[in-house]
């Protein structure tokens, strides 16, 4: 698990609110976020001018950037790390728990659970048992993300899929049991991706379940899904 980043404590309470709200909106929309959207949509008790000032500070600190001169801002890799350290997992909705538990208790294999995870997360899911025993699903979720609709990015994602077994083989034995998060530059699947993983042991067999998506994936939510899965296997 990525530990809480002490640099997060250097931000003021207002800067944390602005950053967390910007991340939330960007994860939802995949579009650069303007200050006006933050104030109007999320009813922030801060003036637009103050939000703009705080965004400038956050940009200077390297937590957000402007992809274009006239565009809004998007979070950087550092922003996701800071946000995750402050809030590692969301409370899982009861409907999500019920959906997961239904397939886990009724299914004779892990595949229905993998498909349910892909549906709930909106990302791709892979499931491996040691080496050379890999199943993946939800690839259409991955290819449908707006980041990957450009031809060059589509090629990059396709390469990751082609190398998935090789990447997992290299990870499997080294990973400790429990949940792990890989964001951007430290992600063995690709610097343009985000990954949440669960390595577990159940019935004498080790397994590795992962949720793979764009770097703007909802890490706290995906962690909550895998944490619930982990509790089931204990």
Image: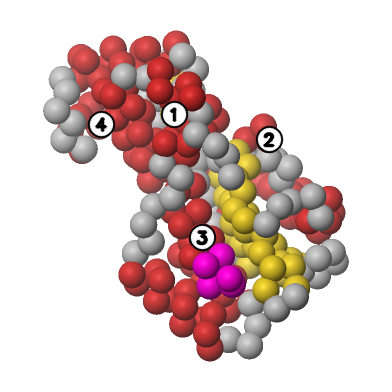
Packing grade of label 4 (10 A; few <14, some 14-19, many >=20) is many
Q: Is residue 82 left or right of residue 185?
A: left
How far apart are the alpha carbons under marks 1 and 4? 12 Å
Q: In x, y percent, where is residue 7?
A: 48, 21
Mark 3–mark 4 CB contact (< 8 Å): no
Q: Secondary structure at mark 1?
A: strand
Range covered by the magenta-colored residues: 230-234
Q: Is residue 193 left or right of residue 17?
A: right
Q: Is residue 202 left or right of residue 55?
A: right
Residue 186 is labelled as 2
Circle 1 sits on which residue? Answer: 74
Circle 4 sits on which residue? Answer: 38
Residue 1 or residue 50, whichever sits in front: 1
How far apart are the alpha carbons under marks 4 and 2? 30 Å
| Location of residue 172 with respect to 96 vertically, above or below | above
| Location of residue 147 with respect to 38 vertically, above or below | below
User: Which quarter of the image is occupied by the C terminus?
Assistant: bottom right
Q: Secondary structure at mark 3?
A: helix
- Which of pointers 1 and 2 lies earlier in the amino acid sequence? 1
- Which of pointers 4 and 2 lies earlier in the amino acid sequence? 4
- Which of pointers 3 and 4 lies earlier in the amino acid sequence? 4
Q: Main secondary structure of the magenta part?
A: helix
Please indicate, yes or no, whether residue 70 appears anywhere in the rendered image.
Answer: no
- In the picture, residue 72 is in which quadrant? top left
Please say which color scheme the image uses.
secondary structure
């Amino acid at each position: 698990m990525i530990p809480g980043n002490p640099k997060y404590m250097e931000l003021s309470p207002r800067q944390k609110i602005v950053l967390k709200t910007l991340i939330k909106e960007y994860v939802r929309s995949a579009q650069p976020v303007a200050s006006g959207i933050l104030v109007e949509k999320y009813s922030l008790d801060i003036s637009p001018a103050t939000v703009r000032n705080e965004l400038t500070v956050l940009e200077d600190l390297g937590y957000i950037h402007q992809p274009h001169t006239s565009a809004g801002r998007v979070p950087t890799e550092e922003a996701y790390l800071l946000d995750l350290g402050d809030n590692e997992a969301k409370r899982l909705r009861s409907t999500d728990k019920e959906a997961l538990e239904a397939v886990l208790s009724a299914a004779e294999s892990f595949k229905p659970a993998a498909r349910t995870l892909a549906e709930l997360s909106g990302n791709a899911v892979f499931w491996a048992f040691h080496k050379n025993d890999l199943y993946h699903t939800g690839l259409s979720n991955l290819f449908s993300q707006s980041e990957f609709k450009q031809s060059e990015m589509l090629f990059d994602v396709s390469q990751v899929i082609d190398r998935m077994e090789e990447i997992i083989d290299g990870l499997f034995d080294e990973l400790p049991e429990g949940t792990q998060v890989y964001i951007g530059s430290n992600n063995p699947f690709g610097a343009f991706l985000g990954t949440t993983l669960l390595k577990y042991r159940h019935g004498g067999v080790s397994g590795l379940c992962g949720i793979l998506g764009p770097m703007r994936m909802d890490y706290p939510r995906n962690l909550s899904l895998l944490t619930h899965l982990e509790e089931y296997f204990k």
